[in-house]
């Protein structure tokens, strides 16, 4: 029996757009006095971390997620600006409206970056490169900000490519060039390869993607399980993940790091405050076009020695107010089985277990009548 020929599926055309030093660039745009100066977006304080750094600050080694105190040591003359997420979200919406002119297949990763599938585009531009150029030009004209973009046959390569010509750059990896593009890159450019995995791969003589590609795939699977298979696929430029618009919300949370470590009993006012922020975000989610509501309350704690502990509860009736959320979150402290003397540097309040509001209400009514 002759096997049927496999259907050849043309490669996707994916664009990854990444705004350049987004929060810091918005601050510099809106305040001319900050232009050309090293700007660090962060709350000042012993426990604060950097949200964003302008390119002028990055030259001194300042990076996102770095402790603010270290950023101050690296760049003593930096201008520290507290973040204004209301403004950043407004600009992000503006940028996404530009994306939507070209495709409906948009997968936001954060306020400042997104994947776009432009295999078929709404503006009839001749190529993905032309789409990326048009998007970058519109962002510059309409927001007075710059964005970098990567164009590639899949999400994995497009994300790497967008970083190659930053800031304000465009880098294109065509399908025929993908293997050669990836080969000389260090393995830490692969998603999920942090310092620990990098060290494990180095012990196997794997430092670059070309090394990974040449390594026995079965041995990778034996050592690292499914992730070993994934690593081998990535080394070959294989990434079948589609661009997924409107990914459903899995969890909403708010957290805070304290200037001084606190005991469990001292956390109540902070839990109540954070519950207010989380509930406001939940209300926006519930009012959105998907109308989803949460059923599970999550309490997150980080001890003074950086160990993270979470406790959660799915009550019979979902929380219906900020006060109920705060009450449940505070009560979850009783489930923390650590010594009373333990001190905490961070607390977070979250909501998870999202379900469709209409189906949830219908189910409640059904069981109420049973």
Image (cartoon, grey):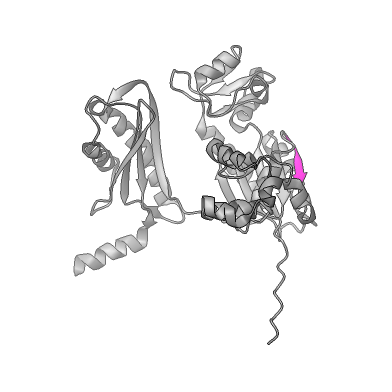
Q: Position of residue 157 (x, y in %)?
A: 68, 49
Q: Quadrant of the C terminus?
A: bottom left
Left or right of residue 82: residue 4? right
In this view of the protein, can residue 243 be seen by the observer?
no
* Magenta run includes residue 170: yes
Q: What segment is highlighted magenta in the picture? A: 168-172
The quarter of the displayed image where residue 262 is located: top left
Q: Residue at x 73, y 38 (%)?
A: 164
Q: Position of residue 292 (x, y in %)?
A: 40, 54
Main SS of residues in magenta: strand
Q: Residue at x 41, y 44 (%)?
A: 252
Q: Nearer the viewer, residue 298 or 29?
A: 298
In this view of the protein, can residue 233 be seen by the observer?
yes
Left or right of residue 329: residue 176? right
Q: Residue at x 73, y 35 (%)?
A: 168
201, above or below 76, in the image: below
69, above or below 177, in the image: above
């Amino acid at each position: 029996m002759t096997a049927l020929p496999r259907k050849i599926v043309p490669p996707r055309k994916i664009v990854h757009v990444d705004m350049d030093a987004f929060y810091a660039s918005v601050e510099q745009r809106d305040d001319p006095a900050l232009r050309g100066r090293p700007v660090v977006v962060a709350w000042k304080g012993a426990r604060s971390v950097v949200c964003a750094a302008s390119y002028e600050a990055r030259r001194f080694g300042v990076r996102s997620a770095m402790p603010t105190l270290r950023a101050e040591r690296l760049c003593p003359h930096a201008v520290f600006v507290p973040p204004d997420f209301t403004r950043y979200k407004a600009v992000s919406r503006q940028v996404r409206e530009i994306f939507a002119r070209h495709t409906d297949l948009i997968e936001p990763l954060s306020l400042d970056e997104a994947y776009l599938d432009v295999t078929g585009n709404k503006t009839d531009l001749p190529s993905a490169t032309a789409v990326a150029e048009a998007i970058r030009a519109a962002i510059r004209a309409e927001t007075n900000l710059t964005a970098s973009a990567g164009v590639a046959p899949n999400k994995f390569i497009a994300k790497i490519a967008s970083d190659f010509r930053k800031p304000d750059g465009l880098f294109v990896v065509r399908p025929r060039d993908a293997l050669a593009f990836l080969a000389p890159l260090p393995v830490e450019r692969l998603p999920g390869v942090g310092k620990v995995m990098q060290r494990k791969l180095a012990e196997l003589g794997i430092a670059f993607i070309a090394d990974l590609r040449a390594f026995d795939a079965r041995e990778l699977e034996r050592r690292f399980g499914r992730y070993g298979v994934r690593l081998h696929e990535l080394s070959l430029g294989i990434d079948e993940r589609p661009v997924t618009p409107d990914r459903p919300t899995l969890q909403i949370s708010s957290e805070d790091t304290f200037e001084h470590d606190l005991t469990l009993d001292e956390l109540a006012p902070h839990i109540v405050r954070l519950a207010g922020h989380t509930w406001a975000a939940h209300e926006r989610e519930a009012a959105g076009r998907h109308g989803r509501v949460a059923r599970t309350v999550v309490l997150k704690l980080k001890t003074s020695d950086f160990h993270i502990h979470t406790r959660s509860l799915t009550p019979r009736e979902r929380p219906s107010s900020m006060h109920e959320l705060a009450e449940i979150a505070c009560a979850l402290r009783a489930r923390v089985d650590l010594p009373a003397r333990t001190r905490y540097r961070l607390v977070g309040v979250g909501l998870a277990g999202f379900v469709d509001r209409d189906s949830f209400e219908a189910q409640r009514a059904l069981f109420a009548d049973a």
